Image (cartoon, grey):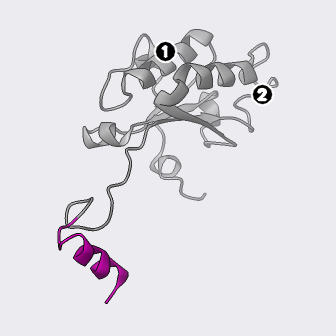
Amino acid sequence: MSRRERERERAGGKAEGKAGGRGPASPASPVTVTVCRGCCCGTQEKHPGVDHAGQYERLRTAVGDTGRVRAVKCLDTCAHSNVVVVGPSSEGRAAGGRPVWLGWVLADDMIEEIAEWVRAGGPGLADPPGMLDLQQIAVSRRVSAGLPG
């Protein structure tokens, strides 16, 4: 008898967790904010006078526990530097939300608008506040899928 069958038997034959009894339900994933840093995004050479490290920390603080903010080395959309991708939570994805790519994220008010959007639920659950809709960029299928070359 497999471990799964033993657990099912102990539970009285009742399926637990996910539909179909395939184990415990996975926890909901939060809105993710991916910030491009390390290539041209986030550098003084490309954007002198912008406090890139300060903006990143302000974004992390403003988002708090309502989402997850992470930095990556390059999102391969350098022409739109600084690039930020706001990915939907699991609930937002279920509601039809898809990752939203934002370009030219250089001003502090944009950082606050991104954080406000995350706190409101992000893609699929809330419309982007302020002028963020004007910052949306289209990326190639290769870039959005993370495909090589």
In this rendered view, identify the residue nearer to me: 127 or 30.
30
Which residue type does callout 1 highlight?
Glu
Mark 2: amino acid:
Thr
| Residue located at (64% from left, 28% from top) | 81
Residue 9 found in image quarter: bottom left
Question: What segment carries the magenta color?
Answer: 1-15
Residue 43 position in % (x across, y down): 77, 28
Residue 47 shown left or right of residue 93 in the figure = right
> Disc 2 to disc 1, how far (Cα)?
22 Å
Residue 51: quarter of image: top right
Asked if residue 4 shows in the view, the reply is yes
According to the image, label 1 marks what residue? 113
Q: Quadrant of the C terminus?
A: bottom right
The residue that label 2 is drawn on is 43
Residue shown at the point (31%, 90%) measured from the top left: 1
Quick check: 14 left or right of 83?
A: left
- Callout 2 secondary element: loop
- Label 1, secondary structure: give it: helix
- The answer to whether 51 is drawn above or below residue 37 in the figure is above
- Report if residue 27 lies within the magenta region: no
Q: Are marks 2 and 1 in contact (CB under 8 Å)?
A: no
| Residue lying at the far bottom of the rendered structure | 1
Sequence-first disc among 2 and 1: 2
The spot of residue 116 in percent (x, y) is: 45, 17
| Above or below, 13 relative to 38 | below
